Amino acid sequence: MEDTIAAISTALGIGAISIIRVSGEEAIKKVNEIFKGKNLEKVETHTIHYGHIVEGNFPIDEVLVSVMKKPKTFTTEDIVEINCHGGIATTKKVLEVLLQTGVRLAEPGEFTKRAFLNGRIDLLEAESVMDIIAAKTESTRKLAINQLTGKVSSLIHNLREKIVNILANIEVNIDYPEYEDIEEMTLSLMKPQIEEIEKEIKNILKESENGKLLKEGIQTSIIGRPNVGKSSILNSLLEEEKAIVTSIEGTTRDIVEGEIILDGIILNIIDTAGIRETEDIVEKIGVEKSRKLIEDSELVLYVLNQNQKLNEEDKMIMNQLNGKNHIVVVNKIDLPPVIDLKEYENNHPIVYMSALENKGIEELKDKIRELFDMNQVEKKDMTYLTNARSLAILKNALISIEEMKKGIDSNQPIDMLEIDLKEVWNLLGEIIGETYQEELLDHLFKQFCVGK
């Protein structure tokens, strides 16, 4: 991190301005070499200056240059931001002239990586930067902001502090047994403290299910026999003609995808091939994909035709849906009723609709809201863990805590339990980046966009 890096930090294209960010020990000096205006090495920090970027004696662009001196910057290094005119050619030319001074082109996420390594932000806050950029809804933006401001990190810090207090007590008991005024850490004293930590971890994991829901959305598949109106329902939900609709069975041979935002939560919807026995090779592959999606989806909309009796395939799928989040959608209510669902009414949420006449689509949305308790999600505290890495680590920490409880119940020696407790402390440290592997950082920051 001793070199100086630069990158275009705005999206390339036609626009009013583009910003090129420079960070490092020589950031101000290097930009000053190509800037015609005030001497940037002598200006006050956090000031903006008008001038031109030049290549030799030839002007490249009229610019505003922001100078921010360390340590009060995003990376805690000297940072210069060149605000030039928008446009691909101009922006790239300014960057090219800058790189000719010996500045290195930044890698994806390298500015944020430097902010983390320099102690400006922790790993959760670093990950939230990309979440803010990728946010598609107001809810996901709020989640990311909560992580960026450190609210989520404080949950982990508090847990680690409680563990440190237990560990410190154990260490004093072991190393200084002559100190009689220090309370001896016994199994009976340790157990309620471990149970409290276990309770807090479980609560974070439980609440984080809402965070996962808001961030990743609900993987939703529309399943059913051919020609029951699956594609029409998809089009009605999306409010566009995304899927081809015909009266010919087997029209949808592969999956068709789309997404809607319902009460701030994204529904990633997949319209599947109709499930039936077929000799058509392409359609057969589509049918197999449909069957697999029943297992993989977080919400299944199982579509039936009011004008058809249930067949054995329908009955088998209805039983398969038990225990899964699902809604039985009885379509084509404009046709005479033939279907009989009496034996399934108590175990399956059912919505009646007509995609042709656009009836029942709001009732379907209301049933989805009810199923996922969407009305309550945004009313709750949005201090959640939201990424798979953090949640996986926290689940491992919970497993270790549960094993410790078993050890306490079986009267294991305190010093043996101390080893397990240190492991939990280290795992929690991985979440916020107090402990990490270089390979993890490389993998994590490569997912960022260049310039961030």
Image (tube, rainbow, N blue to C red):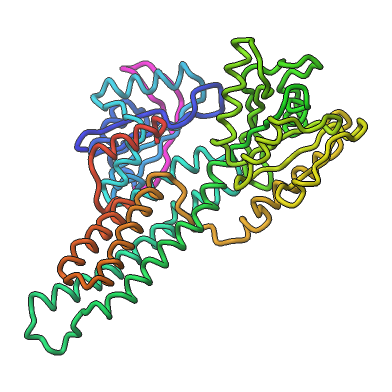
Residue at 29% across, 23% down: 99
Residue 53 locus on image (x, y percent): 38, 25
Could you tell whether 171 is left or right of 85 in the image? left
Range drawn in magenta:
45-63
Q: Does the magenta stretch mainly form a helix, a strand or a loop?
A: strand
Residue reaching furthest to the front: 312
Could you tell whether 190 is left or right of 216 in the image? left
Could you tell whether 384 is left or right of 282 in the image? left
Residue at 25% across, 47% down: 436
Residue 399 locus on image (x, y percent): 33, 57
Residue 377 locus on image (x, y percent): 61, 56
The answer to whether any part of residue 72 appears in the image is no
**Relative to residue 206, is residue 276 depicted above or below?**
above
Quadrant position of the N terminus in the picture: top left
Residue 81 locus on image (x, y percent): 39, 36
**Relative to residue 56, is residue 180 depicted above or below?**
below
State which quadrant residue 29 falls in.
top left
Residue at 65% across, 38% down: 300
Quadrant position of the C terminus in the picture: top left
State which quadrant residue 35 falls in.
top left
**Relative to residue 7, is residue 389 depicted above or below?**
below
- Residue nearest the viewer, comparing 40 with 195: 195
Per the image, is 356 magenta? no
- Residue nearest the viewer, comparing 198 with 80: 198
- Residue nearest the viewer, comparing 90 with 364: 364
Could you tell whether 93 is left or right of 316 in the image? left
Residue at 38% across, 49% down: 390
Per the image, is 47 magenta? yes
Residue reaching furthest to the bottom: 181
**Relative to residue 381, is residue 248 depicted above or below?**
above
- Residue nearest the viewer, comparing 148 with 418: 418
